[in-house]
Amino acid sequence: MSDVLLELGRRPGARKLVSSLGLPIPMPVDLARAKTGRTERPLAGKSVAAALGGGAVGTAIANIVAQAGATSWVLGAAAAAQKAGEAWGAPPKTLDIDAIAADVRFHGLVFDASELTEPAQLEQLYAFYHGVVRKIGKGGRAVIVGRDPRGLPPAAAATQAALDGFARSLAKEVGRKAATANLVYVADGAEARLAGALRFFLTTRSAYVSGQPLFVSNDVSGDAPSSWVRPLDGQVVLVTGAARGIGAATAMALAQEGARVMVLDRPEDQAAAAELARKIDGVAVGVDITAADAAEQILAAAPGPITVVVHNAGITRDRTLGKMDAARWNSVIDVNLGAVARITQTLLDKDALAPGARLVCLSSISGIAGNAGQTNYGAAKSGVIGFVTASAPLLAARGIAINAIAPGFIETRMTDAMPAAIREVARRMNNLGQGGQPEDVAQAITFLASPGAIGITGQVLRVCGGALVGR
Ligand code: NAI
C-alpha cells in the first residue's frame, strides 16, 4: 500500500500545504538509494567533516574517507589526514568549526572517539557535533567510531558506552532530514577492518539504518578486501524465500555484486522464482525449507561451493495467544527458526561451508520488542538471535561469520496485510518517518554477506529507520 504522505511530499506545493496543517508528524523526506552495484569511490563529490585522533583509528578513518573519494575537512590529526589525502589525490582542508562558510553542507560527520577514556572528554564529542550538526546535508551521515566498552576499565567503559546513547539520540534529531547517525566499535588491532562498516554507514547502502551500533572485531581470520567493486564476483550464494519481497530484492542486490544466486522458494512458487533467476542469471531452486532433506536438496542444486547463505524465508500466522491454534504456532516456529538451525547444521556437518563463508539470518524487530498477536513469530525471531549469538564463536573457529538482520517496518506484502490504521502508525514510528523498502534490507544483507564485513560476527543489525520500539 503506497505511502500517501511520502508521495505528497514529493510535490513542493502539496508539501508546503500539508506542512502548514501542523500535523503531529513531520513530512517524511525521500531517502536516496543506490541504483547500481558498489563502486570504488562512492563518496566522490561529497564533503566529510572529521574529527580525528592521532592513533590507529584516526589514521584508518582518514585513509578510508580519502580512498572512498570524499573531500575531507579535518579537525586534529592533520598529518595522518594529509598523508591519506595525498595518497588518494584528495588533500584535506582544515576544519575551523567557528568559521564554516554559510553555504557549506557536509554529507558525512565522522568523529573518532577511540582515544576517549574519561567522561569529561566527551565534551570533545559535544563540541564537534554541536559545531557541525546544522551543516549536515539532506541524506547526510553521522558516524562515531569508538572502542568496544566490554573489558575496559569502568571509566573508559562508561565513556565509550556513552557513545551509544549519543548516537541513538542524534539519529532521532537528524532523521527529519533523511539523515542517519550510527556507531562503530572497533577492537584494538582490527582498524584495518573498519572500511566495510564505515563505507556502509557513510553511503546510500545504509539508507534505512539509523541509531545502530556495529562491532568490528578480530574474530574470524582473513584479510580486508582489496577491491570494493563486485565483491561477490563468481560466488555461489543461497537466498531462501527469494521469489518475492525482501528475498527477491536481496537476490537482485547480490547478483549486482557479481554473485551466482540460488533463488530458493517453495515448489508452488517456482514460476516467480524461475522468472527472477532468469533475470539475474541465477538458479531457481524449488525446496520447502521445512522438508527433512532440505539441505541435501540445496546441495544437489548448487552450481558450485556455497559461500553465502541468506536465511530469509519466513511466514507470519498472527493471532492473540488464546486464539492461536497449534498449527499456527508450529508452522511459524519451524519455518522461521527450526529450518534455519537444521539446514545450517547439515551444511556444517557435510563441510559444505568453507572458511570465508558468511551466513545472514532474518530476525525482526518483533523478536526484539515483541508484538501483540505475534507470540509465535516473536519467539521464532528472537530465537534466531540466540542461534546467531551462540553459533558465532563456534563458526569463527572455522573462519565463518554469522549475523542477523532485524528489519522494522518494510513495505512488502507482509506489511500490506496489516489493518490500515495500524499500518499507518507503524510506518511512522521511526526516526525517518516512513517504512523501509525491501532493497534497504537487501543492501544491509549484501554488506554482511561481502568480504568487506570482515570482523563482524554474532551481531544483530537493525534495518528499521531507528524504530522507536526495542533496543
Ligand atoms: P514475503 O512473504 O514477501 O516473502 C517470504 C518468502 O518466503 C515467500 O516467497 C515465501 O514463499 C517464502 N517461504 C515461506 N515459507 C517457505 C518455506 N517453507 N520454504 C521455502 N520458502 C518459503 O516476506 P518478506 O516480507 O519479504 O520477509 C522476508 C523475511 O524478512 C522473513 O523472514 C520475515 O519474517 C522478515 N521480516 C520482514 C519484515 C517486513 O516488514 N516485511 C519485518 C521483519 C522481518
Image (tube, rainbow, N blue to C red):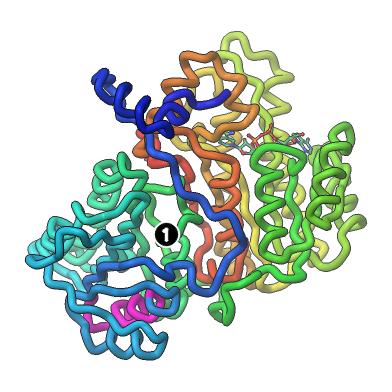
**Furthest residue toward top:** 323
Quadrant of the rendered image containing residue 92: bottom left
The residue singled out by tag 1 in the image is 201
Residue at the (41%, 31%) spot, across then down? 11
Q: State which image quarter holds ligand 1.
A: top right
Residue at the (68%, 48%) spot, across then down? 311
Q: Can you see residue 172? A: yes
* Disc 1 element: helix
Q: How many numbered badges does the structure rendering display?
A: 1
From the image, which quarter does the C terminus lie in? top left
**Nearest to the observer: residue 236 or residue 18:** 18
User: Is residue 61 in the magenta section?
Assistant: yes
User: Is residue 381 in the magenta section?
Assistant: no
**Furthest residue toward front:** 13
Whether residue 310 sits left or right of residue 279 in the image: it is left
Residue 385 in the image: x percent, y percent? 54, 46
Type of amino acid at the residue the image marks with label 1: Phe
**Nearest to the observer: residue 145 or residue 254:** 254
Residue at the (86%, 48%) spot, across then down? 284
Callout 1: 10 Å neighbours few (<14), some, many (20+)?
A: many
State whether residue 75 is above or below residue 384. Answer: below
Give the residues drawn in magenta, as a range: 52-65
Residue 411 in the image: x percent, y percent? 56, 32
Residue at the (52%, 43%) spot, across then down? 406
